[in-house]
Image: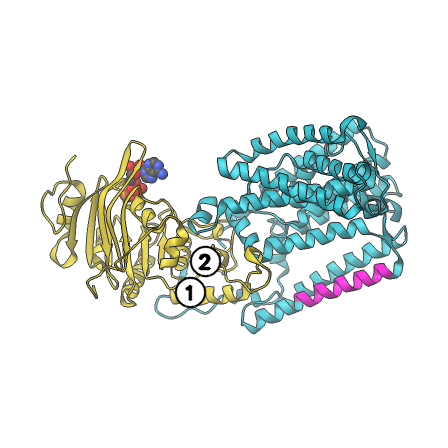
């Protein structure tokens, strides 16, 4: 938590899907150089909040501030431009494309040429950068030219994570990035999260594994039934307390607002 | 997966090793080298027909074959793009009919010069495709339904454009020349030499660039084999056609469009986005790709290619009538790429499948004509070939999945 203005702040975010209120007046913030754990039971609204930030599913109402400035994120490109990178829970990869193509999807390197979208791809440049990116993650994949559909679940997850590091992100949103990973790979991703923090990125980590969460985060925000129920500093809380907040056994405690009723 | 925690992993340079025949054979069987499998199928078909009737592989008949497949091959080029998106365009036959009718009416009835008349037809095809693409992207109607409506609607438009006349004969030398021009031996060889030179040069430049960036390059034997095969095909095509009427302009037009669209699909950002949308539209959307815009452009291109195919068909027939673009044209235009390995489910395929598929189906049809088979038999055999191709494709995909974890 290097300074007082959060790199990303959400105020009063609400989102409904028909009769289902997925998010109700949710506040959320992350500072540069901070890792925030976003936790809550299944259906608490974590992924919905991530999608509101990343622009793939804009919220119905609420305010988003980026480095203190109000911004509107209504399309994934808005988020990308701000430097918000996302790893989705369902990975969102194209199985028919190879690793290189997936890493650069929507942000392809082009080698000048004809107008508009008909520009030629810079395959050499992209393949080169892919090696750099994957080496940085200390991970080898059979070949950067293998189809993503043929990779194992963990390898796919690594590709999705590597993709989020492509630009120069300011904020990285990781929606259950370790769900498909083995013990060693999970450790690797947590180590990566630490490195991202050291580089000054704001990191949001969603996970159901509180042990993992406690290992890397600075702060924990708990959602329950689409509402904020608690906000803890890691150093000032315990797993039991967080579990209590998640399940609704806890009321009025924690650093955050207590809205766990209903 | 291999994790080398701590130390940095070396870039995967595995492919750089020597040419591996066993790996090659496995990839062949698993359908990675789909085009090669289709070419093998084509060779078998040719051998069968040649053994039944030795006029099949004559220069005259092979030149006829080229002329027969040009129109449908061009239409299939557009279909490939649509299939890559995981969509379907059922209107291409009707669009080729109505646009060729527009060309004929402009040229013959209104006395337009050939080039403006051709341009009008192509623009009309693009506009029709644009409209259909817009409707299905904007209102989220499945392409199946929109283009089925198009199939009916544009057929009606074709009757309307043709009016009472019914049939319009074309005798403009430029339009007729599109399928009636054959290049002399000298010109043909120059064209072949230029094409081969450009291909070799492009391959070598690409290879040099990869090597300069210290990326794995295609094994030398494979490269040599590829260059030799393509050059050999070009040389054979010229040698055969020049021993008849000459290298047909129509064939050149088809190959030129295939090469152009192949480049578009494999080498440009647009093409990459087409594959991405066809593979996982939601992932493409989340990555910031304007999925709707891609859909609209692809359908516009499909309409454009349908018009170009329609023009070539009219040129060959020397007329446009009420049944132009009808009959089995639509089905063959879609079946061709599928036979040659382009998936109906999106995200997989190649523009070359338009050409190869047209050749496969065209060869069967041509060969059965030589054998004077009834059209009932022709339809059934063509249907069986399509079914066989789809089944082979499905099996290959299953195998690929099973062998997935390399
Ligand atoms: N596209 C959608 N359409 C309708 N309802 C949705 C949609 N997306 C999410 N919801 C609903 O919104 C609520 C929150 O879902 P969300 O995916 O955000 O939960 P989550 O906290 O990410 O859960 P999990 O831990 O299972 O991933 C759920 O009740 C879910 O059913
Ligand atoms: Mg979720």
Return the residue at label 2: A103
Instruction: Answer left or right for B7 relative to B36.
Output: left
What segment carries the magenta color? Answer: B187-203
User: Please, which chain is the residue tagged with disc 2 on?
Assistant: A
In the image, farthest residue toward the bottom: B212
Q: Is residue A93 magenta?
A: no
Q: Can residue A208 be spotted in the picture?
A: yes
Image quadrant occupied by the N terminus of chain B: bottom left
At 81% from the left edge and 54% from the top edge, which residue is drawn? B237
Q: Secondary structure at mark 2?
A: helix
Return the residue at label 1: A133
Q: Can residue B340 be spotted in the picture?
A: no
List x then y, in percent, for residue B10. 45, 69
Indicate whether A116 appears above or below B294: below
Colour cyan maps to chain: B
List x then y, in percent, for residue A198. 27, 67
Q: Is residue B188 magenta?
A: yes
The dot on residue A188 is none
Indicate whether A196 appears above or below B262: below
Colour yellow maps to chain: A
Q: Residues within 10 Å of mark 1 (few under 14, many from 20)?
A: some
Q: Secondary structure at mark 1?
A: helix
């Amino acid at each position: 938590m290097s300074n007082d203005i959060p790199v990303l702040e959400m105020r009063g975010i609400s989102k409904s899907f028909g009769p289902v209120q997925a998010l109700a007046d949710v506040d959320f913030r992350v500072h540069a150089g901070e890792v925030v754990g976003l936790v809550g039971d299944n259906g608490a609204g974590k992924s919905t909040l991530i999608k509101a930030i990343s622009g793939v599913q804009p919220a119905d109402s609420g305010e988003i501030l980026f480095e203190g400035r109000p911004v509107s994120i209504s399309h994934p490109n808005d988020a990308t431009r701000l430097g918000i990178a996302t790893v989705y829970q369902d990975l969102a990869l194209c199985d028919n494309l190879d690793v290189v193509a997936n890493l650069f999807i929507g942000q392809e390197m082009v080698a000048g040429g004809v107008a508009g979208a008909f520009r030629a791809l810079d395959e050499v440049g992209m393949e080169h950068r892919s090696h750099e990116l994957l080496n940085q993650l200390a991970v080898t994949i059979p070949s950067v030219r293998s189809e993503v559909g043929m990779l194992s679940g963990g390898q796919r997850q690594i590709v999705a994570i590597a993709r989020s590091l492509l630009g120069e992100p300011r904020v990285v949103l990781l929606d259950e990035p370790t769900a498909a990973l083995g013990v060693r790979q999970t450790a690797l991703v947590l180590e990566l999260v630490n490195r991202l923090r050291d580089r000054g990125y704001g990191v949001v980590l969603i996970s159901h594994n509180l042990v993992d969460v406690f290992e890397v985060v600075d702060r924990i925000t708990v959602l329950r039934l689409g509402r904020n129920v608690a906000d803890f500093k890691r150093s000032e809380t315990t797993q039991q307390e967080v579990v209590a907040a998640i399940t609704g056994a806890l009321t009025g405690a924690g650093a955050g607002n207590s809205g766990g009723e209903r | 997966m291999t994790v080398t925690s701590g130390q940095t992993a070396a870039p995967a340079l595995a492919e750089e090793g020597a040419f591996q025949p066993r790996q090659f054979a496995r990839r062949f069987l698993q359908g990675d080298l789909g085009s090669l499998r289709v070419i093998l199928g084509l060779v078998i078909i040719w051998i069968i027909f040649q053994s039944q009737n030795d006029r099949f592989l004559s220069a005259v008949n092979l030149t006829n074959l080229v002329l027969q497949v040009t129109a449908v091959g061009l239409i299939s080029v557009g279909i490939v793009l649509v299939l890559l998106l995981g969509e379907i365009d059922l209107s291409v036959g009707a669009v080729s009919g109505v646009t060729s009718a527009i060309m004929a009416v402009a040229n013959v009835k209104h006395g337009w010069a050939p080039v403006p008349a051709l341009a009008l037809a192509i623009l009309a095809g693009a506009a029709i495709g644009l409209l259909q693409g817009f409707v299905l992207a904007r209102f989220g109607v499945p392409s199946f339904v929109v283009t089925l409506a198009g199939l009916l609607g544009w057929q009606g438009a074709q009757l309307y454009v043709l009016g009472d006349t019914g049939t319009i004969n074309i005798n403009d030398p430029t339009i007729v020349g599109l399928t009636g021009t054959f290049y002399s031996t000298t010109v043909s060889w120059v064209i072949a030499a230029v094409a081969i030179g450009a291909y070799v040069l492009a391959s070598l430049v690409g290879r040099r660039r990869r090597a300069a960036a210290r990326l794995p390059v295609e094994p030398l034997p494979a490269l040599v084999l590829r260059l030799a095969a393509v050059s050999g095909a070009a040389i054979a095509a010229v040698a055969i056609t020049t021993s008849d009427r000459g290298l047909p302009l129509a064939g050149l037009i088809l190959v030129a469009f295939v090469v152009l669209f192949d480049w578009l699909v494999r080498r440009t950002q647009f093409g990459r986005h087409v594959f991405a949308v066809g593979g996982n539209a939601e992932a493409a959307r989340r990555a910031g790709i304007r999925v709707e815009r891609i859909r609209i452009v692809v359908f516009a291109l499909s309409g454009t290619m349908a018009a170009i195919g329609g023009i070539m068909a009219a040129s060959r027939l020397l007329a446009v009538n009420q049944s132009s673009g009808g009959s089995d044209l639509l089905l063959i235009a879609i079946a061709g790429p599928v036979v040659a390995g382009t998936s109906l489910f999106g995200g997989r395929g190649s523009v070359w499948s338009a050409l190869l598929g047209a050749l496969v189906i065209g060869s069967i049809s041509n060969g059965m004509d030589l054998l004077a088979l009834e059209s009932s038999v022709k339809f059934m055999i063509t249907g069986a070939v399509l079914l066989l191709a789809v089944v082979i494709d499905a099996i290959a995909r299953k195998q690929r999945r099973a062998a997935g974890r390399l």
